[in-house]
Every structure is written in C-alpha cells, then in structure tokens.
Amino acid sequence: MPATPAWPPASTPRLFIDQPLGPDAAPLIDGAAVHYLLGVMRLKAGDPVLLFDNRSGEWLAVVAGAAKRSLTLRIERQTRPIERVPDLWLCFAPVKKARLDWIIEKATELGVARLQPVITERTIVERVKSERIAAQIIEACEQCGRTALPELAPPVKLPQLLKDWPGSRALLFADEAGGVPLADVAAPAPAAILTGPEGGFTGRERELLTAHAAVRRIALGPPIRMVAAHPAR
C-alpha cells in the first residue's frame, strides 16, 4: 500500500480569515492577501488554499474567481476541527522589537492559549503595540498549522495583574534567585508562566510575587539566559 502523502502539501498557502467558514461558505479575500495569493504564490482558478477562522477549524478551499483587488474562494471540505490546547498562559514583560517578535512566535508555536503583556518597573518598552502583536500571532498560526489563535490580553501592570489573578490558576514565576526546578513542578491546569524584563524583576516586585498565594517560584537553571534564548526572567 502506498504511503499516505503528507498533509498539507508544503506548497499549499494557508491563511487566517475573519469570516465564518463552512460547507456553503464562499469566502472573499481582499487586501494584502490578494497580492500574496496571486502575485507571490501565482494561484489560478482551481488551485487549493487552506483557511482557518478561529471558530470551526481548518478548511480546504479552491480559487473560484479573481478580480484586481479581490479573490473568491469555494469551500471543498473541512480538513481539521478546531484545536484544543493546554490551558496555559504566558505572562511576559515586553522587550525590544526583535526579541519580542521571537517571544510571540515561539509562544504561539508551542501552543500557549493566552498571551498577557505585563508592565514591570524595569520594562523599557514605552508602548505595547497590540495590533502588531496580533498580526504576529496570525502569521505564526498560519505558518505552524494552529487552527485557533491564542488570546491576546490588554497590557496590565504587575501589581494589578496580581490583584486580579484568579485563585484557581497557578502562576509559575521564573525567578533568577532560585526556586523549584521546572522539571520537578507538577503544576495542575490551569496555569501560567511569568517572565520578566531584560533587567529582571525589582526586589519590591519579587516580594509581591512571593507573597501571592497563587505564585510558585521556579528555577530555570544557574545560567542567566538572554531574551534571544527564551523570554527574559
């Protein structure tokens, strides 16, 4: 028996579309996606496109018609249902642009359910560009095959985050001063991981964290890792 071909084919474009998808849907593509599909991928009538809508999973569509600034697709079938991911949040202090891009990309690829920017005393980013982060989330999902977008929460200051923290969710605090090795932590779901800014947490912030009932201090090992290796502690 011949081997089952890999799915999806590497050459098949994959796009997020903020329109409900289903057997009778006829999605209309416009904007930059049209240039990508027609100008870059050189699609023509009948060519396949994979779509996901953050509601119903992934669908195979084909090009039904093209105009100068829009593209009509026809749904063929569902390829995968909406995914289920572990109920894990990443709470992170925003860092400089290139390193922040890396954090968003890798957290999305690893299946984080929610991304929560946290403003700390040493956060050097003046403004969190939520629209840009949202676009990065979509791009990462398109590339890695996820069928659901992680939720992007509004930025919040650390004291307010702790004040509003749900008691049922463990908050794993990556503390450079030490803690339980991550490999030894059996955190029940739901849980979240908190990483800090490039300069680390201040002593006052560390006191707030260690005094909170939901916080569990974890250690990532003795080396001080750069943000390029993982989110700053």
Image: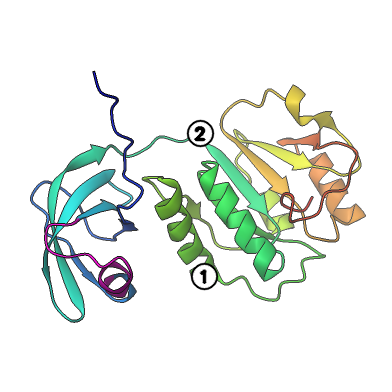
Q: Earlier in the sequence, mark 2 or mark 1?
A: 2
Q: In the rendered view, does 71 fall on the left or right side of 87?
A: left
Residue 69 coordinates in the image, percent (x, y): 21, 80
Magenta residue check for 145: no
Residue found 31% across the figure and 38% down from its top: 7
CA separation in Å, label 2 and label 1: 25 Å
Kindly identify which numbered label has been placed on residue 132: 1
Residue found 18% across the figure and 81% down from its top: 68
Residue 143 coordinates in the image, percent (x, y): 44, 52
Question: Which image quadrant: the N terminus?
Answer: top left
Is residue 48 depicted above or below 189 in this figure?
A: below
Badge 1 density bin: few <14, some 14–19, many ≥20, Cα 10 Å: few
Q: Secondary structure at mark 2?
A: loop
Magenta residue check for 35: yes
Q: Nearer the viewer, residue 166 or 185?
A: 185
Is residue 180 depicted above or below 143 in this figure?
A: above
* Range shown magenta: 34-47
Q: In the rendered view, does 153 fall on the left or right side of 60?
A: right
Q: Nearer the viewer, residue 165 or 105?
A: 105
- Specify the amino acid type for callout 1: Arg
The quadrant in which residue 58 appears is top left
The residue wearing badge 2 is 86
Q: Secondary structure at mark 1?
A: helix
Residue 2 coordinates in the image, percent (x, y): 25, 23
- Specify the amino acid type for callout 2: Pro
Residue 164 shows in this picture: no
